[in-house]
């Protein structure tokens, strides 16, 4: 049995195999057969891309989905996450995809529940399947990670995507730069240097923008002028290398962290990331059941 909690737990060879698997599933349209396996997606935070991408991956592999709605579940009566998972396991669910606001929610589960747990995002901590689809997108573009200059721009301190991506890209040999307002710097993120987007933009191979996570902020900031001061404007994008790409995990705050005219520009891979998310998650399902 394999959990999928964080890419930090995996050696680089396994990560590269997952990338290769995802690209193969995308190109060949041939998927592992997981029919008659029962899975449940437990999302305790709002989600469009991750939740529906997992559902698409599950359907493409023939899985049976046991649907769960946190708003109508016994969680509203005070039931714990552990008891919810234990209940669903007791009726036959064989794998759980879980998103939860609590950092490292999985620590209360992985030694007590004898089925795979897939982390679909824990608080401000980690988002390993988003990282995997980002790796797939970058590898499709460049065929390597070594010596790529990756700029991660925006709300670094609250972003599980920033935490996940920076760590694994550094391990894979990329150079990491954080372009963020001083009030969103994270002192624990020591795998890269901090600077402004104006300084970093012309040398970047990948510009990875982050959503401003207003729901996690304790202090207000001037969103009205954020794009001009810190975001990816058309003027800044004009200074990018011709072969550099724009990425964003979405949802997107249009004209806040990115000028809306750049979202579907020729250098943007934002919707490619969403496409790749399905195949990356098929690779994860194949890993937890067949490895």
Image (spheres, rainbow, N blue to C red):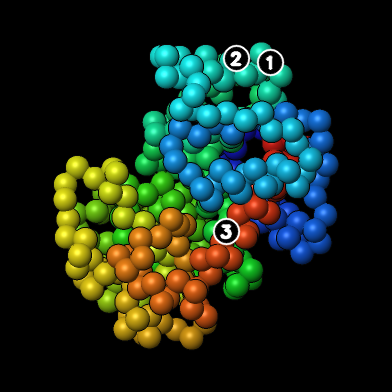
Count neighbours of disc 2 (C-alpha within 10 A) and say few if under 14, some if 14 to 19, many if 20 or more. few
The residue beneath circle 1 is 91
> Counting other residues with Cα less than 10 Å from the Cα at mark 1, is it few (<14), some (14-19), or many (20 or more)?
few
Q: Does residue 12 appear in this view?
A: no
SS class of the residue under badge 1? loop
Q: Which residue is mark 2?
A: 87
Residue at the location (60% across, 14% down)?
Answer: 87
Q: Are marks 2 and 1 in contact (CB under 8 Å)?
A: yes
- Disc 3 or 2, which lies upstream in sequence? 2
For image coordinates 39% across by 63% down, the residue present is 209
Q: Nearer the viewer, residue 167 or 93?
A: 93
Q: Is residue 68 above or below residue 74?
A: below
For the residues marked 2 and 1, what is the alpha-carbon distance in whole angstroms? 7 Å
Where does label 3 land, which residue? 274
Q: Is residue 185 visible?
A: yes
Where residue 197 sits, quadrant-wise, is bottom left
In percent of width and height, residue 65 lies at 69, 33
Q: Which element type, helix, strand or loop, lies under badge 2?
A: helix
How packed is label 3: few (under 14 Cα within 10 Å), some, or many (20 or more)?
many
Question: In which quadrant of the rendered image does the N terminus lie?
Answer: top right
Could you tell me which residue is drawn at 48 percent across and 27 percent down? 70
Give the quadrant of the C terminus: top right
Against 90, residue 168 (above or below) is below
Report the number of discs.
Answer: 3
């Amino acid at each position: 049995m394999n959990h999928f909690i964080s890419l930090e737990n995996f050696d680089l060879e396994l990560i590269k195999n997952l990338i290769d698997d995802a690209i193969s599933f995308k190109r060949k349209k041939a998927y592992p057969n997981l029919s008659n396996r029962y899975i449940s997606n437990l999302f305790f935070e709002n989600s469009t891309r991750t939740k529906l991408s997992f559902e698409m991956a599950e359907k493409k592999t023939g899985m049976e989905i046991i649907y769960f709605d946190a708003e109508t579940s016994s969680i509203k009566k005070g039931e714990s996450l552990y008891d919810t998972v234990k209940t669903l396991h007791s009726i036959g669910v064989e794998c759980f995809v879980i998103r939860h606001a609590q950092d490292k929610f999985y620590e209360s589960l992985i030694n007590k529940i004898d089925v795979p747990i897939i982390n679909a995002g824990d608080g401000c901590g980690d988002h390993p399947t988003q990282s995997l689809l980002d790796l797939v997108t970058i590898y499709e573009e460049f065929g390597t990670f070594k010596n790529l200059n990756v700029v991660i721009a925006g709300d670094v301190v609250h972003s599980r995507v920033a935490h996940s991506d920076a760590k694994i890209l550094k391990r894979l040999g990329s150079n990491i730069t954080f372009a963020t307002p001083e009030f969103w710097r994270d002192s624990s993120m020591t795998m890269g240097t901090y600077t402004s987007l104006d300084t970093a933009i012309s040398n970047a191979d990948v510009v990875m923008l982050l959503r401003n996570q207003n729901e996690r902020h304790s202090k207000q900031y001037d969103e009205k002028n954020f794009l001009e001061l810190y975001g990816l404007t058309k003027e800044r994008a004009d200074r990018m290398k011709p072969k550099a790409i724009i990425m964003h995990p979405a949802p997107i705050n249009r004209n806040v962290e990115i000028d809306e005219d750049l979202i579907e520009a020729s250098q943007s891979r934002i919707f490619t990331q969403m496409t790749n998310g399905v195949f990356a998650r098929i690779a994860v399902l194949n890993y937890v059941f067949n490895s």
